Image: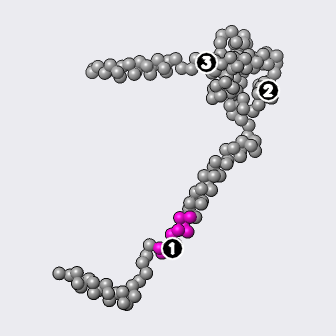
Amino acid sequence: MPRLPRALRWAALAAALACASGPAGGVEPGEMLADPALEARARRISQELRCLVCQNQSIDDSNAELARDLRLLVRERLAAGDSDAAVLAFVEARYGEFVLLRPRLSPYTIALWGAPLAMILGAVVYLVRRVRRAAPAGAGQAAPLSPAERRRLEELLRREEP
C-alpha cells in the first residue's frame, strides 16, 4: 500500500480529532437533575432556547455564563413542577421572543419571511414586462424590400460577381 504524503496524514489526523471532539456542550455535570426524565425535558427545552450572548447557539450548547444561568432557571422551573410550555412562556416573557430559536408563526414573522420573497417575485415580474415591452412582436424580422430597393440590390450583386 502506498504511503500517504505527510501533509495529507496531518490533515486526516486533524479531521479525525475535530470530528471526535464534537460539540462539548455547555451542560456541566453539576447542573444535571437527578431524575433522568426531568433532565431529558430540561435538555429538550434548552435546545429550543437561544443563547443571548452567542445568538446562534442554543443554551444547551453554549458555555456562556448567561446560558448557564438560563439552564439552571429551566431546571429550577421543571423541578418546581412547571410544564414545558410554562417554562418556555416564562423565559419568553422575561427575555422576549428573540430567546426562542424557533419563533412562533405570527403576522410579523410572515411579513418578515414573505417580504423578501415578494420583492424577488416583483423584480422578476418587472423584468419580464420590461423585456416584453422592449422587444415588440416581429422585431427580429426585416420589412420587405420595395421594388426600388430590390433593383438596387440586384445591381450591387451583379457588380460584385467576377
Check whether the beta carbons of the residues at disc 2 and disc 1 lie within 8 A of each other.
no
Crowd band around label 2 with a 10 angstrom C-alpha radius: few (<14), some (14–19), many (20+): few
Looking at the rendering, which quadrant does residue 46 occupy? top right
Residue lying farthest to the left in this orientation: 162
Q: Nearer the viewer, residue 105 or 94?
A: 94
Looking at the rendering, which quadrant does residue 97 occupy? top right
In what element is the residue under mark 2? helix
- Which residue is drawn at the image coordinates 35% and 21% (left, top)? 7
Crowd band around label 1 with a 10 angstrom C-alpha radius: few (<14), some (14–19), many (20+): few
- Which residue is drawn at the image coordinates 17% and 81% (left, top)? 162
- Which residue is drawn at the image coordinates 71% and 45% (left, top)? 110
Residue 160 in the magenta stretch? The answer is no
| Residue 40 seen in the figure | no
Q: Which of 136 and 149 is in front in this view?
A: 149
Q: In this view, does 98 lie above or below 4?
A: below
Inspect the image, locate mark 2, and give the three-letter code of the amino acid beneath it. Arg
Label 3 to label 1: alpha-carbon separation: 64 Å
Which residue corresponds to mark 1? Answer: 137
Say which mark, if any, is on residue 153: none
Of circles 3 and 1, the one toward us is 1
In what element is the residue under mark 3? loop
Side (left or right) of 75 relative to 150: right
Say which mark, if any, is on residue 94: 2
Sequence-wise first label, 2 or 1: 2
Crowd band around label 3 with a 10 angstrom C-alpha radius: few (<14), some (14–19), many (20+): few
Inspect the image, locate mark 3, and give the three-letter code of the amino acid beneath it. Gly
Q: In this view, does 140 lie above or below 84?
A: below
Residue 89 spot, x, y in % from top left: 79, 28
Label 3 to label 2: alpha-carbon separation: 24 Å
Which residue corresponds to mark 3? Answer: 25
Q: What stretch is highlighted in magenta?
A: 130-139
Residue 66 spot, x, y in % from top left: 70, 19
